[in-house]
Amino acid sequence: AQSVTQLDSQVPVFEEAPVELRCNYSSSVSVYLFWYVQYPNQGLQLLLKYLSGSTLVKGINGFEAEFNKSQTSFHLRKPSVHISDTAEYFCAVSETGGYQKVTFGTGTKLQVIP
Amino acid sequence: GAVVSQHPSWVICKSGTSVKIECRSLDFQATTMFWYRQFPKQSLMLMATSNEGSKATYEQGVEKDKFLINHASLTLSTLTVTSAHPEDSSFYICSARDLQGSGSPLHFGNGTRLTVT
């Protein structure tokens, strides 16, 4: 079984300030890691993913995340946020085999303050 | 890029009626699609895995007779909420992978907001 923990349900940050959204996971087997963004009343859009290799992955819209195996973390960062980054962010893990079912964290609402 | 189209985007129905939600992969074939349910301000809960040409695989606690899934072709999966009740009101989202390779991300439809009165 696998699980994802996003401890921060809401993160307010001023525009142009840096932000980090935390994600920790638990799994007895190898997993793939993802960050998705959801705008109101819409589906999810992939920001970035980690499958293997370099632990620092870059995604769309200036976001990046770092995989830390020892801490079982996959925190999302952006050096300077914009108003348009206001949305819900979900960390997710998936099995590496079978149907590769995806388990989502509870989400973090990023509120960018002008 | 891969597009998943979900229809309708919102629906209001009376208690006791059935509602069908369609999920289509527009520019790729999907042998497997996933149906999620999202409660307000909560995460996505996997309901079932839809398999083309065979029965869907339901997650524990999901009533298969309540949520009927049909994956009749490589580009279409449907979720029918039968005899809907107010507690079925939720945001339903489908997803699929456009590549079969390991680690391929999910592509999501825009969701269906179901309100049962």
Image (cartoon, coloured by chain):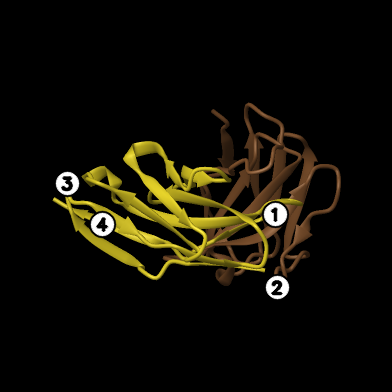
| Chain B palette colour | brown
Q: Nearer the viewer, mark 3 or mark 4?
A: 3
**Mark 2 Cα shell of 10 Å, populated few (<14), some (14-19), many (≥20):** few
| Residue extending furthest toward the right | B54
- Numbered mark located on residue B80 in the image: 1
| Vertical relation: A103 (above or below) A83 | below
Residue A38 position within the rendered picture, expressed as x and y whole percent measured from the top left:
42, 50
Q: Is residue A60 visible?
A: yes
- Disc 3 with disc 4 on a shared chain: yes
Amino acid type at mark 4: Gln
Q: Nearer the viewer, mark 2 or mark 1?
A: 2
Residue nearer the viewer, A62 or B82 = A62
Q: Secondary structure at mark 1?
A: strand
User: For mark 4, what is the residue?
Assistant: A111
- Which comes sooner in the sequence, label 3 or label 4? 3
Q: CA distance from mark 1 to mark 4?
A: 35 Å
- Disc 3 with disc 1 on a shared chain: no
Residue B29 position within the rendered picture, expressed as x and y whole percent measured from the top left:
71, 32
| Vertical relation: A51 (above or below) A72 | above
Q: Chain of mark 2?
A: B
Q: CA distance from mark 3 to mark 2?
A: 44 Å
User: For mark 3, what is the residue?
Assistant: A16
| Vertical relation: A23 (above or below) A79 | below
